[in-house]
Image (cartoon, helix red, strand yellow):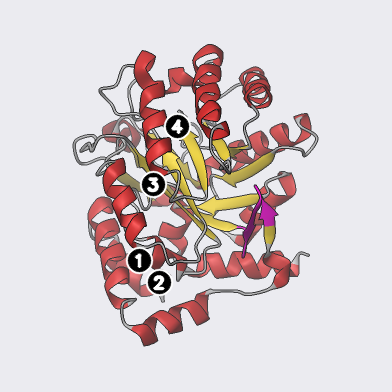
Amino acid sequence: MYKNIIKPILFLLSPEKAHHFTILLLKLILKIPIINTLFKNYYTVKDKNLERTVLGLTFPNPVGLAAGFDKDGKYFKSMAALGFGFIEIGTVTPLPQEGNPQPRLFRLPKDQALINRMGFNNEGVEAMKHRLQKARSHNIIIGGNIGKNKLTLNENAVEDYKKSFEILFDYVDYFVVNVSSPNTPGLRELQNKEPLTHLLSQLQKLNNQKKQKKPILLKIAPDMTDEQLDDIIEIIYTTKLDGIIATNTTIDRSNLNTSKKEITDIGNGGLSGFPLRQRSTHIIRYINEKTKGQLTIIGVGGICSPKDAIEKLNAGADLIQIYSGLIYEGPSLIKKINQAIITNK
């Protein structure tokens, strides 16, 4: 139904309008108890073989929603009704910001891909905290993806991350440090060895002061060399971080089916979706082999089918996340992946 009826209608709208329309409609219809129950019964796959104990948390299944879909923590209950095992919200920044000018989200149907240059548009960490406070009675594993404001200089970035960490600490189950988005000027410079070590050390210092620590993961870019990945692994061990999310969007535009003119007309942004599949899987496998399977990895990038998901898990991912695949394949993708995982046991 989604691919034959709903998707063609949504694709008549601009990507950003389609996104807002879809999630608002979903939230409204799921307020009707019988529809909420029907959705959960249809999309949720319950099986002990799907459960994963990772990061000290018990996930009902390993398929999560990647950050960027629910930037402000407005829709995690609705998205959980589609069968996700966990939801990552954000990227959120200390202060509200509008993000980059529109249009800033583009579809590449020939490639099952998206290009975005959203620019961390969000309502700020305090607004997210208040929403999470109101929704304390939920059984959803929530990750908080945190970033810095565009106007914050890199030398002051640590304070932005620390502020969001402190404000959200009581309301999320794990944290993700996002220094890998290509859409905030200079952000990826924070992936360099010295600034990244300092940033993660400061967050761990705060974490160690808590009665019960929260897992912290680092989300990395797919555009790193193996040597840079070696540095990342060393930093993870030095700062005793809990894991890696591999990967964010790419700035690479090679081997696309979409015409070069269309890509040029779109301009800058991070590419997600199927073209990212091989690169993200390589990085997952590389990190898993280098760390001898001892580091938690959440795999994301190019998962558009159950086969793609199994590939990520076989490469060494403990959990996986989807976003672009959801846009092109619809919510049944979550169910199909979970069914395939059970079959491949």
- Residue occupying the point 44% across, 41% down: 145
Q: Is residue 259 left or right of residue 223?
A: left
Frontmost residue, 178 versus 1: 178
Residue 2, labelled with which disc? 2
Q: Label 1 belongs to which residue?
A: 7
**Mark 2 vs 1: CB contact within 8 A:** yes
Instruction: Name the amino acid, label 4.
Output: Arg
Q: Distance from label 2 to label 1 (Cα)?
A: 6 Å
Which is more N-terminal, label 4 or label 1? 1
Q: Quadrant of the C terminus?
A: bottom right
Residue 253, labelled with which disc? 4
Q: Which residues are magenta?
A: 53-62
Q: Position of residue 178 (x, y in %)?
A: 45, 33
Residue 284, labelled with which disc? none
Which is more N-terminal, label 3 or label 4? 3
Q: Is residue 314 left or right of residue 114?
A: right
